[in-house]
Amino acid sequence: MHMDAHEYLDFEDVLIKPRRSPINSRQEVDLTRSFKTKSGFVLNGVGVMAANMDSVGTFSMAKALAQEKMFTALHKFYTLEQWVAFAKENPQVLPYVFATIGSSQAELEKLERILEAIPVLTNICIDIANGYSAHFLPHIAKVREKFPNKVLMAGNVVGAEMSEALVQAGADIVKVGIGPGSVCTTRKMTGVGVPQFSAIVECAQAAHALGGLVCGDGGCACVGDIAKALAGGADFVMLGGMLAGHAESEAKIVEKEGKAYALFYGMSSFTAMQEHHGGVRSYRASEGKEVYLPFRGAVASSLQEILGGLRSTCAYVGAINLEELPKRAIFIRVRRQINPIYNHLEAPHGS
C-alpha cells in the first residue's frame, strides 16, 4: 500500500480570483480558439463539447451546438446509414463532431465504413471507461496507423503518466475523468478516481508538454465549473448532465403530476447496458444511475448561459479570449463558494 500525501482538489474547492482588467465589456471577449493538433489539423471553435452519451451526444444536439461553434462527441450507436444521411443534410456541422468508438474490432470496422463514406469527417473519439487497460495504448496506436490524417481524442485517464503515454501513442486530445459525472457511480462502486480539477491540471501539464490537448470529461455542475476547467488547463470541456434533459437530447419523456421529465442515464448504468448490450454481464456491475430531469426545452437558452458566463469569467481576469484564460487565472482555496440560504426559494426563469 502506498499513500499519496498530495491534496487533490475538485471544482468546489477553488475559486478564480479577479484581477485588474483592460476589458470594458464582456462583448470584447472572443470565445473561439484555433486548436492546433499533433496530427496537423486545426480545430476552430469554442472548447465546449457535448458528451458521447446516447441522451446527450445526438445529431440534434450537434446541429444546435455547431451554430455556436461548439463541438459534439456523437454516441456510437448510430448506424452507417444514419451517419450518411446526417452528413448529406448537414455538411456545415461535420467540423464540429467526433465519431465515437470503443476498443472492439467491430467498432473499428464500423468507423472505417463511416470514414470511407464521409471522408471529410476528421474527428474521432476513442472512449473507454478505464484508459489504464493494457489493450488501450496498442489500440490507439492501431487507430492512428489506420487514420494518420484524423484528429484522435482518447481516454479516460486522470494522471500525468497516462496522459503522456496516450499522446505518444498517437492521441491528439487526452480525455480526462474517472467517476466525476453526475450519473456515474464508478467511485461509489469501485473507490477509484481523482477529483476532477486536479486531474485536469495534472493531465494538461503533461499533455501540453508533448504538444497534446486535453478534454475534461465530467464533473461540471454549473457554468463556473466549466470556466475553472478551462482556466485550469483544459482545452475542451465535455458536458453530460448540463446538456441533458433538453429537446435535442432526444431522451425518453415522461409526465409526472402534469410536468414533463426526460430520462438521463450513465453509459455504464443498467439502463444503458440493457438497451445496447442485452443486460449487465455476469462478471461486472452497473457503474451508472438513471434519473429523470425536468424537461428543459430547447438547448439554446442553456448555451447562451454557458457562453455568457465564460465571457464574464474572462472579463473578470482580463483575458481577451479563452486561450489567455489559463495565463491570467489565479486560483484560491475556499471552504464555501456561494451563499445557499435562499436556494430552496429560487424562482424558475420567466416567473
Image (cartoon, grey):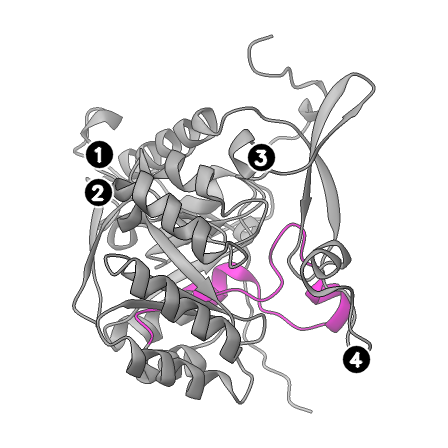
Task: Give the CA distance from mark 3 to mark 2.
Answer: 26 Å
Nearer to us of marks 1 and 4 is: 4
Q: Please identify the quadrant where the N terminus is shown.
A: bottom right
Residue marked by disc 1: 29
Callout 4 amino acid: Tyr
Say which label, 1 or 4, has the lower sequence index: 1
**Are the residues tagged 3 and 1 within 8 Å (C-beta)?**
no
Residue 190 on the magenta span: yes
Task: Give the CA distance from mark 4 to mark 2.
Answer: 48 Å
Q: Position of residue 67 (x, y in %)?
A: 31, 33
Mark 3 nearby-residue class (10 Å; few <14, some 14–19, many ≥20):
few
Q: Position of residue 23 (x, y in %)?
A: 19, 31
Task: Give the CA distance from mark 1 to mark 4.
Answer: 51 Å
Looking at the image, which is closer to me, 288 or 142?
142
Mark 2 nearby-residue class (10 Å; few <14, some 14–19, many ≥20):
some
Left or right position of 294 against 303: right
Seen from this angle, which residue lies furthest front?
81
Left or right position of 13 against 2: left
Mark 1 nearby-residue class (10 Å; few <14, some 14–19, many ≥20):
many
Looking at the image, which is closer to me, 199 or 261?
261
Residues shaded magenta = 171-200
Seen from this angle, which residue lies furthest top?
351
Residue marked by disc 3: 338
Callout 2 amino acid: Asn
Residue ID at (36%, 29%): 308
Q: Position of residue 318 (x, y in %)?
A: 23, 39
Nearer to us of marks 3 and 1 is: 1
